[in-house]
Amino acid sequence: MLSIPSYGVHRSVTTHNINISVFCDWLEGCVLFQEDRDLSGSDVIDHLVETQIYSTQNLAWELLADAWRELRRRQNLLGAGYPVAVGERRLTRIREWRGTPAYAFCLILAFAKWYPSWARQFGKDHTAQGELFESLAKESLQKLFSGWVVHATGWRRSQTKKLANVVSEVAKLLSEGAGERLRWTKPSANDAGLDLLLFRPFPDNRVGVPVYLTQCASGGDWEGKLHTPSLRIWGKLIQFASDPKKAFVTPFSWDDDEFRRNCNLVDGMVIDRYRLLSPGREEPDWILDDLRGSLIAWLEARVQRLPFT
């Protein structure tokens, strides 16, 4: 069984001191990444008491009931794309993690925040994970928004672009005019917080189309990125005929209250883990082979070093 996360799961004596999203990620990780395919509710309760997260089984069973409701919600959202079968009091792995690399990838990205000591083994350079997450987000949006254009604008090692080139690309794609870049951004700026451009063109190629300026936040510092990209800045970089909207893509899962708060902060469309992975609801093997191989290669070392007890 995975060790208890150091984030979001704390000792609970008379009241629950548990982040249910973190706890459910932990349960999924126990099932998806360990050798045993099954995890019973009684095993979870015993572990919570043995590790002194709970002093009594009664309170622990209350937590488990809430967790099972959340896991069933996740299962209902992803359908055939969910790798775990949620039984009455048992979780069963129905797909190996290599058979569901997009889900495993999102879960491991969340684990980097839940297990900071484990994450430090892999260094501070998050460029590779960011590029992989943008690629995953692009494939998902292309599935979710048929007839829309999804254009990658973010800086990449393999395709370094300065902001001037990004602005020129975006302006051309949207048939808009470019603004005064040097007046509003630093000369060294790369992408001004814009990772993906999502828009719905019409055959006339005129302005005034639905546009989302999209941020892909793969790391635990996602809260600091909720306000990016700045529409105030991009409204000066591009002479929009009509105002664009923002979109925010994350591998994390939030409860309803946190999701609503974050939607308000983004002031646009939020795509969390379960919206991001929803193309797998009817088509479990929806990601392209090249991305599948890259995700598995990135995951191998991280899965092998997970903190199992």
Image (spheres, helix red, strand yellow):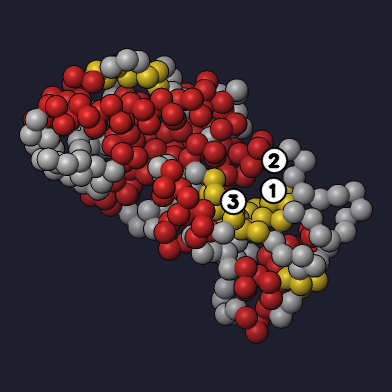
Residue 269: mark? 3
User: In front: 79, or 286?
Assistant: 79
Q: Is mark 3 on a helix, strand or loop?
A: strand
How crowded is the residue under tag 1: few (<14 C-alpha within 10 Å), some, or many (20+)? Answer: many
Spot occupied by residue 251 in the image (x, y as percentages of width and height):
46, 44
Note whether residue 84 is visible.
yes
Question: In the shown orientation, is residue 48 left or right of residue 166?
Answer: left
Does residue 252 appear in the picture of this structure? no
Residue 195's mark? none
**To which residue does mark 2 refer?**
145
Instruction: Provide residue 160's location: percent of width, then percent of height.
Output: 60, 62
- Whether residues under marks 1 and 2 lie with C-beta atoms below 8 angstroms apart, the answer is yes
Q: In this view, does 208 lie above or below 134?
A: below
Q: Is residue 133 left or right of residue 108?
A: right
Q: Which of 65 and 206 is in front in this view?
A: 65
Question: Which residue type carries mark 2?
Answer: Phe
Q: Nearer the viewer, residue 31 or 274?
A: 274
Residue 269 placement (x, y as % from top left) = 59, 51
Find residue 150 and name its label: 1
Q: Is mark 1 on a helix, strand or loop?
A: strand
The image quarter in which residue 93 lies: top left
Please tell me which residue is depicted at 12% across the width and 26% down the height of the picture.
Answer: 57
